Each structure stands twice: as structure tokens, then as C-alpha cells.
Image: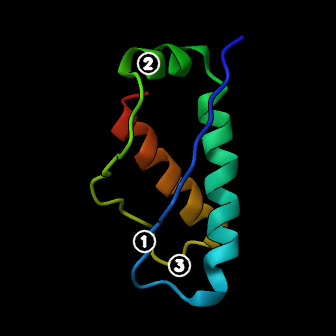
Amino acid sequence: MKHIVLHIDNLVLKGFRHEDRQGIAEGLQQELTRLFADPQAIQQLTANGDVSRLRVSSVQVNQGAKPQQIGLQVAQGIGKGIKI
């Protein structure tokens, strides 16, 4: 079984309230866990090799979205950046 280690050193979220950071982080973690549980994602990550830095294009967030939903949308943007 393959093992994924993901370390996010710095996540820059401009325009969000400081109080929302924990909820955004929780949504991000939950969605990344779901995305990386897919065997096709593991194959894609393995094909990419080590990725020391991933820049993700802008992620559109729905107005009025709750912090966890924002984290989910950011994780989906990361998934697109990795092409999973």
C-alpha cells in the first residue's frame, strides 16, 4: 500500500476572517483525505514524483460559503493542480 505524506508549509488565504481559519483548515483536510483515497490519485501522484512546490491558480469561492466549504473548494483546486 502506498503512503502519502503531504505537508502544507504555508497556505495564504487573502480576504478571510481570522476566526474562519480553523474551519477552512478542517474542510481542506477532509477533502484532501477524500481526494487522495482514490487509487487513480495515487497513480497520478506517483507519476508526478516528488513535488516540492505546487502553485494553484485562483479558486472561486461561492459568496456566503461557510469556512469548511471554503476549505473543500481550496482542496479541489489543489486536486486540479495535481491533475487528479
Label 1, residues with CA under 10 Å away: few <14, some 14-19, many ≥20? few
What amino acid type is highlighted by mark number 1? Val
Q: Residue 64, which numbered label? A: 3
Q: Residue 79 is drawn in which quadrant?
A: top left
Classify 17 as above or below 43: below
User: Pointers 2 and 3 in contact (CB under 8 A)?
Assistant: no
Taking the spot 66% from the left edge, 88% from the top edge, the residue there is: 19
Secondary structure, mark 1, is: loop
Classify 31 as above or below 82: below
What amino acid type is highlighted by mark number 3? Gly
Task: Point out the tag, 1 or 2, that comes first from the N-terminus.
Answer: 1
Q: Name the residue beneath numbered marker 1.
A: 12
Q: Name the residue beneath numbered marker 2.
A: 44
Residue 43 spot, x, y in % from top left: 49, 13
Task: Point out the tag, 3 or 1, that comes first from the N-terminus.
Answer: 1
In this view of the protein, which residue sits in the foreground, 27 or 66?
A: 27
Q: Residue 28 is drawn in which quadrant?
A: bottom right
Residue 27 spot, x, y in % from top left: 66, 58
**Label 2, label 3: how far apart the Cα atoms are:** 33 Å
Taking the spot 54% from the left edge, 65% from the top edge, the residue there is: 70
